[in-house]
Image: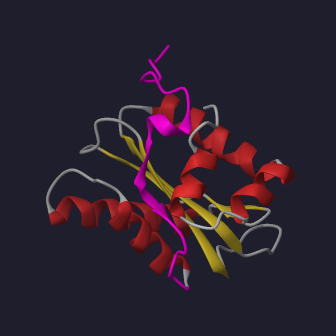
Amino acid sequence: MENVMGIERLSDILRPESVLTPLGAETRDTAIAELIGALDLPGTPADIQAFSQAVLAREEAGSTGIGNGVAIPHARSPRIAKPILAAGLSPRRIDFSSADGKPASLVFLLAVPESSPASHLKILAALSRVSSDKKLLRSLNAAANARELYDRLAPIAV
């Protein structure tokens, strides 16, 4: 069984600087670009561009809008040593072609090592649970600023 890299809470993969509110983007692609810019991605600009293309290719394969106003664009990269996460709260709500037809107000961008499928799935499952917790969603959507959103996300178990 793969080691899940000691990740117990979102604070293990999310930095306060990687939380954006308000997210300024108006489209799926600009939201992804804005959140990629908030990540501390290793490598050259070409590596970052390759990661961006991988995230957009994943979106084309199937929407990461999971419903209830949450989207989780994600991709794996050989340049990433451990999972990292960015989060954004959009007052405009962004169309991620979610199955429930609702635009996303809360967008998580997940970057994971190519060699870490178990961590990838564990983190995606934790983020997916956020979308089904109505009380938590209300709290996250009501965050007044990035620090408040980070403080509400950080303790969430993975």
The residues colored magenta run 1-26
At x 52% / y 75%, what residue is drawn? Answer: 23
Q: Nearer the viewer, residue 51 or 37?
A: 37
Which residue is at the front of the view, 47 or 14?
14
Q: Nearer the viewer, residue 29 or 59?
A: 29
Q: Position of residue 52 (x, y in %)?
A: 35, 65
Name the residue rendered at 73%, 48% in the picture.
130
Residue 137 among magenta residues: no
Instruction: Give the tally of numbered discs.
Output: 0
Q: Quick check: 12 above or below 66?
A: above
Q: Is residue 61 visible?
A: yes
Q: Main secondary structure of the magenta part?
A: loop
* Residue 84 horizontal/vertical position (percent): 40, 45
Asked if residue 94 can be seen in this view, the reply is: no
Instruction: Indicate the quadrant containing the C terminus: top left, top right, bottom left or bottom right.
Output: top right
| Residue in view at x 27 percent, y 53 percent | 41
> In x, y percent, where is residue 98?
73, 69
What is the quadrant of residue 72 in the picture?
A: bottom right
- Picture residue at 51% right of the left edge, 28% below the top: 118
Residue 55, percent from left and from top: 44, 62
